[in-house]
């Protein structure tokens, strides 16, 4: 596989594995996707309506072009984002949430609101932990 390859890999099936010791394996793959920080930030950005790639890239600070490409492809594969190519020269492409993707926005917004409301408490807890455990490697 080349360095520039951006294919999406992983199992397509989301069926539970049937193992008694893995009761969550039927939902783990979905939660991994919608809980990924880049996916959440892209969903938040697309909640405002269709966006072009560069608009998303500018809005989601810190994401690389490659990671954004992988993120929108994965979200498209999961049926949360629709990619539309317009027949213009040069071609224009936009991304928008599907109905299923849009149904996530209230949950993502609630998580974002909670994060903002509690960020100072969490920062204080981290500072206290770091003071009690100098030299730890938890980040």
Image (spheres, helix red, strand yellow):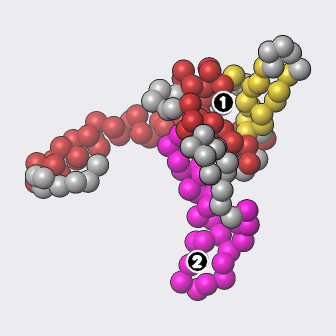
73 vs 83, left or right, is left
49 vs 39, left or right, is right
Tag shown at residue 23? 2
Q: Is residue 123 visible?
A: yes
Magenta stretch: includes residue 27: yes
Which of disc 2 and disc 1 is earlier in sequence? 2
Q: Residue furthest top?
A: 89
Position of residue 97 relative to residue 75, above or below, is above
Decide which of 115, 36 is in the foreground and name it: 36
Decide which of 117, 28 is in the foreground and name it: 28
Instruction: Name the residue rendered at 35%, 40% in the picture.
Output: 118
Label 2 element class: loop
Label 1 element class: helix
Provide residue 35's location: percent of width, then percent of height.
54, 50
Contact check, label 1 and label 2, Cβ < 8 Å? no
Provide residue 3's location: percent of width, then percent of height.
56, 43
Q: Which residues are magenta?
A: 12-40
Q: Is residue 107 visible?
A: no
Instruction: Name the residue rendered at 77%, 34% in the picture.
Output: 83
Q: Residue furthest bottom?
A: 20
Provide residue 110's location: percent of width, then percent of height.
53, 40
Spatial separation of the CA atoms under disc 1 and disc 2: 32 Å
The crowd level at tag 2 (other Cα within 10 Å; few <14, some 14-19, many 20+) is: few
Position of residue 21 relative to residue 129, above or below, is below
Instruction: Name the residue rendered at 22%, 47% in the picture.
Output: 125
Tag shown at residue 120? none
Magenta stretch: includes residue 36: yes
Residue tagged by mark 1? 46
Position of residue 119 relative to residue 31, above or below, is above
């Amino acid at each position: 596989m080349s360095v520039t390859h951006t294919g999406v890999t992983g199992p397509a099936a989301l069926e539970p594995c049937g193992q008694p010791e893995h009761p969550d394996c039927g939902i783990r793959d979905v939660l991994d996707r919608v809980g990924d920080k880049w996916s959440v930030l892209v969903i938040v950005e697309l909640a405002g309506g269709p966006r072009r790639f560069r608009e998303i890239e500018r809005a989601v600070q810190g994401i690389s072009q490659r990671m954004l490409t992988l993120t929108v492809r994965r979200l498209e594969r999961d049926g949360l984002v629709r990619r539309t190519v317009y027949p213009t020269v040069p071609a224009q492409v936009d991304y928008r949430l599907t109905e299923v993707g849009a149904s996530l926005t209230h949950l993502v917004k609630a998580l974002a609101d909670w994060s903002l409301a509690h960020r100072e408490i969490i920062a204080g807890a981290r500072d206290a932990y770091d003071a009690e455990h100098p030299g730890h490697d938890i980040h």
